[in-house]
Structures are given as structure tokens and as C-alpha cells.
Image (cartoon, coloured by chain):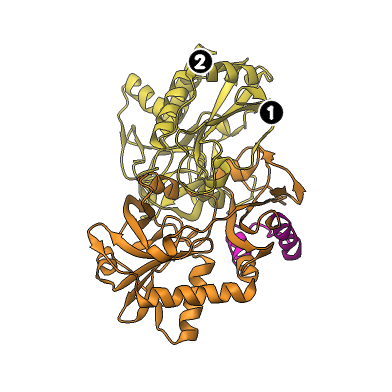
Chain colours: A orange, B yellow
Amino acid sequence: MMLINGAPAESIAATDRGLAYGDGVFRTLCAQNGEPRHWAEQYAKLAQDCAALNLPCPDQARLLSETREVARAHARSAVKIVVTRGSGVRGYAPPMPSTPTRIVVSTPHAMAPFAKTGIQVHVCRLRLGHQPALAGVKHLNRLENVLARAEWNDPAVAEGLLLDEQGLAIGGTMSNLFIVEDGTLITPILDRCGVAGVTRERVIALAAQSGWACRAEPVPLQRILDASEVFVVNSLIGLWPFVRLGRRTWAVGAVSIAMQQALEGEDAATD
Amino acid sequence: MMLINGAPAESIAATDRGLAYGDGVFRTLCAQNGEPRHWAEQYAKLAQDCAALNLPCPDQARLLSETREVARAHARSAVKIVVTRGSGVRGYAPPMPSTPTRIVVSTPHAMAPFAKTGIQVHVCRLRLGHQPALAGVKHLNRLENVLARAEWNDPAVAEGLLLDEQGLAIGGTMSNLFIVEDGTLITPILDRCGVAGVTRERVIALAAQSGWACRAEPVPLQRILDASEVFVVNSLIGLWPFVRLGRRTWAVGAVSIAMQQALEGEDAATD
């Protein structure tokens, strides 16, 4: 089910700047029985990303109401929220004031088995460029992710590992990355590229609550290969442990399982 | 006037990957009395950019017919052609096969006075990131251009100068750059960022025909300030000479005027 600016619809103006320039941001989140999970964190991140583009963020109460409306269509929904700068005349200059377009859409969400089995991961040849003005923001300029995801079509490979132009690991094509070293969690620094997701923030917060050290640091590929556990997270998949990357294999480890349970515990408490 | 996949329309599916990810390319060109200028070059560049994204390019005869149809709506048209990867299920993986969406739209095109008067230019604070996989391609991921263009709203400033993360000049926010040094034309190398436009190629070819040296080289900001003439080009504006950049001023120079006449001569010959 889809709502565009609050009304059932399936199309947008072809002059929308979201199409013309990728001038907008989005969120993807899980809803259970019509109720979005971790709404406060999702809305806060949406507002932060809108601010990065100097884009007016939709009113929270209205957006929550629309999110609940589309989420009711399925027992478990993947809800996508898109906010664009709306239509404008041709040219890069943002219209002043702009009238943002908001799209709220739900699809049925079936969990993949990878949370338990772990995943095989492809190391992407595409390297992420650096753009500090957009780093961390989940904006609509996602061609790097599209090109990286097009590098493989083996269904046994569930995710691709993205490195930046310096060879530092940044995350998965659709997920944030953590490695475990001597019981400490390390996640890449995302101040030059990558997307800083809500589940990444939740893992950092849960680690602090559980007394595990957790730091953002540069993560060269070798550091992943040397790590005792590696996993990726996002709001839809939850936590997927790595079990294979090239010739390196892992068993699903204790920290991954504990963090998965902590995330699922939070989810269950809010459902 | 707008045609979408050949039929009069004004909206696209909200699930289009052009909106979701900026997964597509575009062209902007000038048409006079219903006939697009430099069609062969424009189509060749569109095909090249589609190939960079592994996107099927629309058939040339069909696209030309649609371009003529929308261009007839105005004596002089700005025609925009957008090709996206079409709709798909959620997720970065490109649908196989994909069914591209093509949008062909015209608006009346009035020439600005800047070709004769020259332009005042803003040096953008935003620095372009490097992404060799997308450099030169006129794709729909244009947030850098949007952020750069939002840096000024003084209507006396007609263009912004974009530098890359190393401080090298790459072009204008919507145009390609040339400087003149001792009668030689220099244009930035575009293998790490920037858009390689059709008019840039025309200037390079016209220079060769006229016996002027023309090379692509790194252009630090100081090299612009030291140049005897500086200008930007694109298919809609033609050629705009710089007359002011910060405290540096120029008179409109002989090479700029000669190149402008050469471009206009080609245009007139094909109109």
C-alpha cells in the first residue's frame, strides 16, 4: 500500500527533483502488526538527513499516522519513507520555498534465514568515493550501491562488502558493519562515505548497556579477515553474521548471537 | 510538453528506480523549430552513459521522433531526455531484464544575456568527491550539484565553479570549463568526477579545426586566476565568458568570442 502526500497514489510528477537529481532522503523500517519499530529513532534520523539537505522534514505525527496506515496492510511490513524536495523548474537551484513530496509505502516482509545460518559475502570491486557533505546521510543518490550490488547474482551470496577508495571497509551494500576483536566491537567511521543506520546506533547503545566496548575506527580489509566475528545489521534484516568472505570462513560466534538476541529483545518489547 | 515511454503523460511510477536510487541518466539539449541540435552527438553520449550503468539505451529513431514531437511545442526548446532503469522490487539489485523508463520533455528556452556580457562566478565551497566508475557520466545522482548551486542566490552570479577534493577545478555546476593560456585552450580532466558534456567535445573539435591547441589537464584554482580568458559551455547556454571570480576580473576576450562564433556557426548550419 502506498500513500503520496497522505493520499492513496502510485505515481509522482515526472518533474519531481527526487527523480531529476536524487534530491531527497529515505528510510526503510520494519513494522509489526501496523506499528513501526523504533519510530523515535527512525524519525530522528529522517529529520537529521533532511537537515543535511536543507529539506523541510514532514511533521512527525502526520508521518507516523501514514506509516501506521500503510503498515496495517500486512502482518509484518517493510515500510519505505521517501522525502524529496518536490517539483521545481529545470535547474539545480532548489526552489524557495520548496514543497516536499513524501511517499510512504509498505510491502510484506518475510525474514530471510540468514540471521541463523550466517551469510556468504562478496567483496565489491567498486570503491566508495569520499563526500563528507553527504556521508552518513541516507539520500537518494545511490548509484554506487546499485553498481556494487550488480557485481554478483549468486543467490547464495547475501551481501556485498563495500570498501572506500583507500581500501577501508565501510559497510555492506545495504547494511552497517561490525567486527569483533577480543570481545570489543569495532564499526567503521562514516564521516567520508557510507550510511549511518538506525540499527548501527542501536548496536552501539546495546553494547554500552551490556558493558561491551564499542568504538568507531578505520577498518582495513585485513582487519575483517583477522576478526573473530563479523556481522552486518539493518532495520529489516536484523543481524546477519559472516560465515564466508573469499577463502576466510567463520562459525557464527557468541557475540553475534548475543547481540542478535539483544536486538530481538528490544524489538519484542516494542511490538 | 512531455512524453513518457512515447505517450503524453506527466507522472511516473513512484517505484521507478530513477526516483529510488537515481538509477538513470539524462541529457539536456536545445531544439530550434522542432529540430534538436547536434542530435548525433547527443544520442552517442546518451548511449555511452547508458552503457556506463549497463542500462539499455532507447532506440535512436524512436527517441529522435519523440524529441521532435515535444520540441515542436516551442520555437526554441530546452529538451530534457531522462532514461531510468524503470520500476523494480525494493532493493539495489537491478531487475534482469529491466524495462527502462524514458521521459522526453520540452520547455520554452529563452537565451540569457550572459553570452555577450560575460558572467560573475561563485567559487563553491562544496568539493566534488572522486568516483571513477561514474566520472564523466550525466547520471541522476546530482546532489553535489544541488548542494553547490544552493550556496548562492544572488541573480547576478550566473554560475558556480566546482573544485574537487584536491582543489582542482572540474567545471561549473551545470557547465564545462575552459581556460586560455597563451592562445592554448585547457579543459579539466574528467576521469575522477565531473560531467563530460557534448558542447565540451564540440569545443575540443572546433579548436582542432581552427588550429588552436587544446588539451585536458589538471587545473588548480590559481591556474584559472592566471588565465587570460576563462569560459564555460553547455548545450543550452552556449558559451559564457568569465568576467569576475572573487576579486579577479577579465574583459570578454578574443578566443572566447571566436569560439562562441564557431559554436553559433555550427548551430546555424544545422538549424
SS label for mark 1:
loop
- Mark 1: amino acid: Ala
| In the depicted structure, whether residue A262 falls above or below residue A241 | below
Give the label on residue B9, or none: 1
Residue A31 at x, y percent in the picture:
63, 62
Residue under the image location 40 percent in, 43 percent down: B134
Quarter-wise, where is residue B229 in the image? top left
Determine the main secondary structure of the stretch shown in magenta.
helix
Residue sitting nearer the eye, A109 or A247 = A109
Name the residue furthest bottom. A211
Answer with left or right where residue A126 lies relative to residue B66. left
Q: Which residues are magenta?
A: A45-70
Q: Chain of mark 1?
A: B
Residue B28 at x, y percent in the picture:
54, 30
Residue A190 at x, y percent in the picture:
43, 66
Residue beneath label 2, please?
B61
Query: Disc 1 and disc 2: Cα gap in Å?
Result: 20 Å
Q: Can residue B246 be seen at all in this image of the molecule? A: no
Residue under the image location 64 percent in, 21 percent down: B70
Q: Can residue A2 be seen at all in this image of the molecule? A: yes
Residue under the image location 34 percent in, 81 percent down: A183
Q: Chain of mark 2?
A: B
Residue sitting nearer the eye, A39 or A130 = A39
Ranked by sequence position, the earlier of labels 1 and 2 is: 1
A241 magenta-colored? no
Answer few, some or many: residues within 10 Å of disc 2's Cα (few below 14, many 20 plus, some between 14 and 19).
Answer: few
SS label for mark 2:
helix
Answer few, some or many: residues within 10 Å of disc 1's Cα (few below 14, many 20 plus, some between 14 and 19).
Answer: some
